[in-house]
Amino acid sequence: MRFSIDRNQLINAVQDVIKAISSRAVIPILSGIKIEAKREGIYLTGSNSDISIERFVPAEDEEHQYVTVVEPGSIVLQARFFSEIVRKLPSETVDISVNSELIATIASGRAEFNLNGLNAEEYPRLPSIDEHRFFEIETQALKNIIKQTVFAVSVSETRPVLTGVNWQYEDHKLQCVATDSHRLAMRHVKIEKSSEQLRFSNVIVPGKSLNELAKIIEDQSDPVQVVVTEHYILFKAKHVLFYSRLLEGNYPEVSKLIPTESTTSIVVETKPFLQAMERASLLARENNNNVVKLTGNADLKLELSSFSPEIGKIVEEVDAETYEGEELTISFNALYMLDALRAIDSETLIIDFNGSMRPFLLRPIDDSSQLQLILPIRTY
């Protein structure tokens, strides 16, 4: 194998695929990056037991020549050393060649490195995917879904299904739900293009996979194609294939947790309320439970407060645009509220309460496709 490649293109590709490589790989060859040179360009692959990422660097596009393949071939190189070398190469062009003994020579400018490689034929193949069960989604919509749900997954492995986001699809509507049993994030989006009669209800995508996916999919005009199978989900973006193993188990039915009525509804401007919450949470962090108290009534003045016996107290008033219903005093986890507010992409939001000890909802006032649910905290 022998080829030349633009250094920046190689760096970007390596940074993408290395996200799927574990430093504690059970199978030794999976600690490496598979590099395959073909006439149309270079394919790099990284994989572990949960995620596989294939990144393609085309030989050329309309404006640039990125790769020149002299001799096709393949090899697996240790990811940690290869990535460090690539980032420190001095020239804009990198020449890589592999001899019959699987020794790779990496040359750039006056620097030259030799790395022992492994036979690429021994590298596990990417999962076999039936691509007939698919839908397409705009890149920004996919990023928004991830941003607005994945923060609410559980970080505890005691209930593994809650460490993922539940995806349901029916009648051209994709609904995504995440919960850690103390809060819930839900987002749904209309899908314009999908395979006929596509339907699924218990697809649980690991939160870690979605976080990594969001880091590598670029903003692009072409939609992302999503292929769903029994055990895997595949995201096909520009020059990237991202495979994730799905979590096994049944996701809990969450629709009954969402209140259908409220005793108090408050409309506030999102940014000022978020900023006030950030200030109120400064002392809440010193408490183990991160508690902030909200008090409100019909005078359109909301009071946010937090208290630390060792440090002091914070009290701040925030204006409400409207206030309907009963007087309210409620305590909640400040971090949960901050996460929910940062996920809401709207200048104004409505918060619906149903008493001081029932879950409450946050929603953009002009968008019914998203909601956040938080359980209050008993403070007495």
Image (cartoon, grey):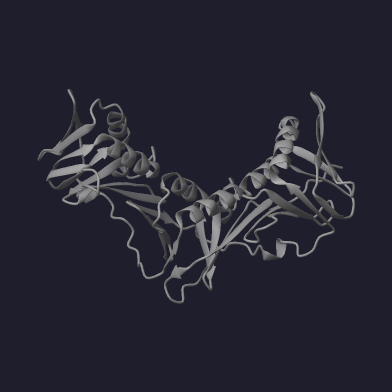
The front one of 378 and 149 is: 149
> Percent position (x, y) of residue 208?
49, 47
> Percent position (x, y) of residue 179?
63, 54
Question: Is 369 positioned to the left or the right of 88 in the image?
Answer: right
Placement of 367 over or under 94, stated as above or below: below
Q: Residue at the bottom extreme?
A: 197
Answer whether residue 375 is visible to the viewer in this image: yes
The front one of 186 and 269 is: 269
Answer whether residue 374 is visible to the viewer in this image: no
Q: How many marks?
A: 0
The residue at the point 58 percent across, 45 percent down is 155
Question: Is 102 positioned to the left or the right of 178 in the image?
Answer: left
User: Which quadrant of the structure image shows residue 105?
Assistant: top left
> Percent position (x, y) of residue 379?
83, 42
Q: Residue at the front extreme?
A: 63
- Quadrant of image for the N terminus: top left
User: Which quadrant of the structure image shows residue 271?
Assistant: top right
- Quadrant of image for the C terminus: top right
Placement of 209 over or under 170, stated as above or below: above
> Percent position (x, y) of residue 47?
35, 47
The residue at the point 80 percent across, 46 percent down is 320
The residue at the point 71 percent across, 65 percent down is 256
Placement of 119 over or under 288, stated as above or below: below
Question: Is 349 positioned to the left or the right of 308 in the image?
Answer: left
Question: Is 40 positioned to the left or the right of 341 in the image?
Answer: left
